[in-house]
Amino acid sequence: MTGLTRTSADLDPRRRRILFRCWHRGIREMDLVLGQFAEQAIADLSDADLDELEKIMAEEDNDLVKWITGAEAVPERHRTPLFERIAACRPDFSPVTMEPTGKAE
């Protein structure tokens, strides 16, 4: 998934804003993580979950990437079931490598 595929027509203004902000973070890695999560879950999140999601979204993208990829420990304040659900949406951020195919012809 590389962009918004869910319509926001059936969402209230707060959910629309959050969905948009999840896909427009500033760095593509976080667009993919938060955007995919929001597409899957935004309609079903409780108000408390939306509050927590907005707190997570207030963090710096570079910090979020480190926490989600495991490069740094997740701070205690974000060790929650919601953060775990978000982190589960992460794509494979491993660098692409190619195995040698043999001699060049």
Image: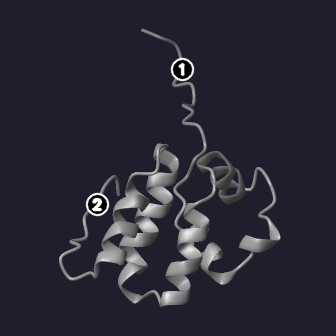
Instruction: Tell me the residue at 66%/83% (across/down).
Output: 81
**Residue labelled with disc 1:** 102
Q: Nearer the viewer, residue 14 or 71?
A: 14
Is residue 88 in view from this perspective? no
**Labels 1 and 2 touching (C-beta < 8 A):** no
**Residue labelled with disc 2:** 4
In the rendered view, tell whether residue 104 sits above or below residue 23: above
Q: Quadrant of the N terminus?
A: bottom left
Pointer 2: residues within 10 angstroms few (<14), some, or many (20+)?
some
Residue 47 at x, y = what percent? 48, 88
Q: Nearer the viewer, residue 73 or 59?
A: 59
Name the kind of residue labelled 1 in the image: Gly
| Colouring method of the image | one colour
Task: Give the SS element for disc 2.
Answer: loop
Residue 38 at x, y = what percent? 42, 71
Residue 21 at x, y = what percent? 40, 59
In the rendered view, tell whether residue 96 sits above or below residue 100: below
Name the kind of residue labelled 2 in the image: Leu
Residue 78 is left or right of residue 85, and the answer is right
Residue 77 at x, y = what percent? 76, 73
**Quadrant location of residue 88?**
bottom right
Residue 38 is left or right of residue 49, and the answer is left
Q: Looking at the image, which residue sits at the far top?
A: 105
**Quadrant location of residue 84?**
bottom right
Residue 61 is left or right of residue 80, and the answer is left
For marks 1 and 2 on the same chain, the one whose residue lies earlier in the sequence: 2
Q: How many marks?
A: 2
What is the spatial separation of the Cα atoms under label 1 and label 2, in whole angstroms? 40 Å
Pointer 1: residues within 10 angstroms few (<14), some, or many (20+)?
few
